[in-house]
Image (cartoon, rainbow, N blue to C red):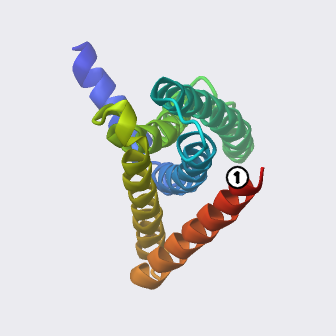
């Protein structure tokens, strides 16, 4: 059955030693970057002197999609190069090419999984930060922006918390550090935005 075959390929790819660590690392890093981008957009458009709801929503959506495509593609290319090197090393060790074997096919599936999961991070960041703007009217943009900023800082905290757990460090400390960095970035960008 095609479905069972696909499940088998996915299971084999996830069992590769580098797949899950790479998925976690790329997703967390991209989530961090994407959240900062969303924060910058909120400051630049929603907290400006003449905010327009449709422009804010459009900018957040298009930026999230662009980041998703960009990060997914860059990770795909980077992982393709890295795993091609590994496959060649395995082939040399086994004295036979393995690119067209189950090892090579599993490696390709691993690359696809890593890049797809990574490309989801900007979409998640965009979906969370855009939600307040979808639920309010034009006259409540300031309130939506404030809620969106709080959600973005919360995402940074959760991202840091996850990083702390993954690295066997202090999750709360790591989360707090990421949140403080987010607040500092928000303050700097807000001051710059107000001065322009």
Tell me where residue 175 appears, x and y as whole percent: 45, 74
Residue 138 falls left or right of residue 99: left
Location of the N terminus by quadrant is: top left
Q: Nearer the viewer, residue 15 or 127?
A: 127
The single residue placed furthest to the right in the displayed view is 196
Q: Position of residue 91 (x, y in %)?
A: 69, 39
Q: Position of residue 61 (x, y in %)?
A: 49, 28
Residue at the image point whose x is 63% and y is 32% from the top: 98
- Asked where in the image residue 95 lies, by quadrant, the reply is top right
Query: Does residue 6 lie above or below 137 as drawn?
Result: above
**Count of numbered badges drawn on the protein:** 1
Q: Residue at x 62, y 49 (%)?
A: 40
Towards the viewer: 10 or 195 = 195
Q: Residue furthest top?
A: 2
Q: Residue at x 53, y 42 (%)?
A: 46
Q: Quadrant of residue 165?
A: bottom left
Residue closer to the observer: 136 or 23: 136
Q: Is residue 123 above or below residue 156?
A: above
Quadrant in which residue 70 is drawn: top right
The residue located at (53%, 71%) in the rendering is: 178
Residue 119 in the figure: left or right of residue 79: left
Of residues 8 and 182, the one drawn nearer to the viewer in this rendering: 182
Q: Is residue 188 left or right of residue 2?
A: right
Task: Residue 14 in the image: state x and y as whole percent.
Answer: 40, 45
Check disc 1 and report the residue beneath it.
Answer: 193
- Is the residue 61 above or below the residue 184 in the image? above
Disc 1, SS: helix
């Amino acid at each position: 059955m095609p479905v069972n075959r696909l499940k088998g390929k996915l299971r084999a790819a996830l069992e590769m030693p580098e797949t899950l660590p790479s998925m976690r690392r790329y997703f967390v890093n991209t989530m961090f970057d994407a959240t900062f981008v969303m924060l910058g957009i909120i400051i630049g458009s929603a907290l400006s002197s003449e905010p327009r709801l449709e422009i804010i929503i459009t900018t957040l959506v298009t930026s999230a999609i662009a980041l998703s495509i960009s990060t997914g593609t860059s990770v795909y290319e980077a992982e393709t190069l890295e795993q091609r090197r590994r496959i060649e090393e395995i082939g040399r060790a086994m004295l036979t090419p393995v690119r067209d074997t189950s090892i090579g096919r599993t490696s390709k599936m691993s690359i696809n999984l890593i890049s797809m999961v990574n490309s989801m991070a900007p979409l998640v960041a965009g979906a969370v930060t855009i939600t307040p703007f979808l639920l309010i009217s034009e006259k409540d943009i300031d309130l939506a922006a404030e809620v969106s900023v709080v959600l973005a800082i919360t995402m940074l905290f959760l991202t840091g918390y996850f990083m702390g757990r993954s690295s066997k460090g202090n999750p709360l400390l790591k989360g707090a550090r990421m949140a403080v960095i987010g607040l500092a970035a928000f303050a700097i960008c807000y001051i710059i935005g107000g001065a322009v």
